[in-house]
Image: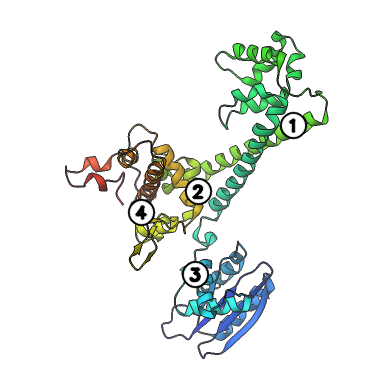
Amino acid sequence: MANTNHPIAALHWVAIDVARYWNAVLVETASGQRHRFRMSNSAADMQSLIDFLRGLGGRCLVALEPTGDYHRPIAHRLLTSGFEVVSISSVAQSRFREAMFNSWDKNDPKDAAVILEMLKQGRTQRYVDPMLAGHHDIQELSKTYYQISRARTKVQHAIINHHVPLYFPEMHKYWTSTRNEWWVKFMIEFPTPAHVRRYTCQEFIELASPVVGRRVHRVAKLTEVWECCADSGALPHDPQSVAVQTFLFTLRHYQHLNDLRRQLEEQAQNLLASDADYINLMSLPGVGPINALTILAEAGNLRRFGHHRQFLKYCGFDLAKSQSGVQRGRERLSKRGNARLRLAFWLAAVVAIRARENSFREKYDRYVSSNPKDPDLKRIALTAVAAKMARVAYGMIKKNQPYRQFFEQSLPSGSIPLNRAVGAPT
C-alpha cells in the first residue's frame, strides 16, 4: 500500500495523458529521474503501473486529464490502491501547453509533460470517484434517463413534423402534451383516416373508447374525429402499405421509449425515497423527481463544497468579465461548470416563477418590473433566479433542512434587506 500520510515521505509525481486505447505515462521520482512509457486500458497494464509506483516507495501524487469516461477505471484502481489522484482541466491544460511551448502543436508525450508541470505547480482540481463517493448508481440512472429522453424527443419530432402531416393531419390538434399516452395508443390502432372510416360512427366509438380512456365528452371527441376523416387532408395511403407499417413501427418505438422513461422514473423514486437530500430538494419550488435526481447525480455530495460560491462556480453560475486597460467588458456567466446541473436549476426556475407565491417569483418580478416585455431582461432575471435556486439548494442540503417558504419574512422586520432576501438560509 502506498504511504499517503507520512509527512517526510519522498514525493513522486505521476502524469497520465488518458486516451481510448493507450495512455502516455510520465513519472518523475523524488530524485528527479523521469520514466516514460505507454500503457493500455487493460487490467494487466493498470496493475503493472500500480506495482511500479509501489516499488518507488514514499508518496505518489497522480494527475490525469479526464477524457470521456476512459479515465474512470484507471483512476478507480489507483484510488483503491491508496494513491492520491487529482484531475487537470482540459481548458487549462490547452492554455498552459500553448504558453509552455509557444505553439498549438500537441501530442501525447507533450501533453503528459504539461500535466506533470501543472501537477508540480498545484494547478489541479479535486477528483471525486462516483463509485467511491456512493452516487455512481444515481449518476448512471440520471444519464440513462437523459439519453432515453433525447431519443424520445427525436422520435417525437419525427412523428409530429413528418408522419402526422402525411398520414393523419387532423389528429395534430389533439396532441396536447408529451405525456398524452392515449394519443399514441389511438394512432397505433387508427394510423390513417382510412382505418377510421372503415367502421360506422357507432362502431368506431365502441372500439376507440377503451383507447381514449374515461374522459369527459369522449363520445363527442370521437364523433368529431370520425366526421373529419370523411374529407381528410392526408395522403391516400393503402392501410396495408409499407409506408403505414413504417409509421406504426415509429409509433411503437415511441411508446417503448415512454415505457422506459416511466420505469426509470419509478426506479429513481424507489432508490431515493429515503434519501434525506432528495426529500429536502423535493420541497424546493420547481424541483421535481427528475430535477432532484439530476442535481444529486451531477453534484454528488454538496457538503464537499466549503461555500455556496464554490458550488455556483461548479454549476457555471459564477460571473466573469474581460478587462483590458480602460476597456471593461460586461459581466456574464462563465458557463465553465456542469452544463446539466445548470440546466436542472434553469428548468426548476422556469417552473418556480410560474407559481403564485414564493421568493423566487418575487425576485423575478423585481428584475423585470422596469420592462416586463423585454426578452433580454426576462432571460437575465431567469438566470438570476436559477443561480439563487442553486444557492438555496446548497444551503438546504448543507444544513439538512427542507425549504421554508418566505424564510426572510419570519425574521424580525428589517433584518434582511429585500434585495438580499432568499428562500432558505445559505
Q: Are marks 2 and 4 in contact (CB under 8 Å)?
A: no
Q: How is the image coloured?
A: rainbow
CA gap between label 2 and label 3 equals 26 Å
Q: The residue under label 2 is which amino acid type?
A: Thr
The residue that disc 3 covers is: 92
What residue sits 83% from the left and 25% below the top?
A: 240
Q: The residue under label 3 is which amino acid type?
A: Ala
Which tag is nearer the camera, tag 4 or tag 3? 3
Q: Nearer the viewer, residue 73 or 249?
A: 249
The residue that disc 4 covers is: 398
Which tag is nearer the camera, tag 1 or tag 2? 1
Which quadrant is home to the N terminus? bottom right
CA gap between label 3 and label 1 equals 49 Å
* CA neighbours of label 4 inside 10 A, class few (<14), some (14 to 19), many (20+): many
Residue 402 on image: x %, y %:
35, 44
Where 190 sits versus 367, above or below? above
What residue sits 57% from the left and 68% below the top?
A: 75
Instruction: Tell which circle, 2 or 3, labels the residue nearer the N-terminal end.
Output: 3
Left or right, residue 90 beside residue 243: left
Q: Are marks 2 and 3 in contact (CB under 8 Å)?
A: no
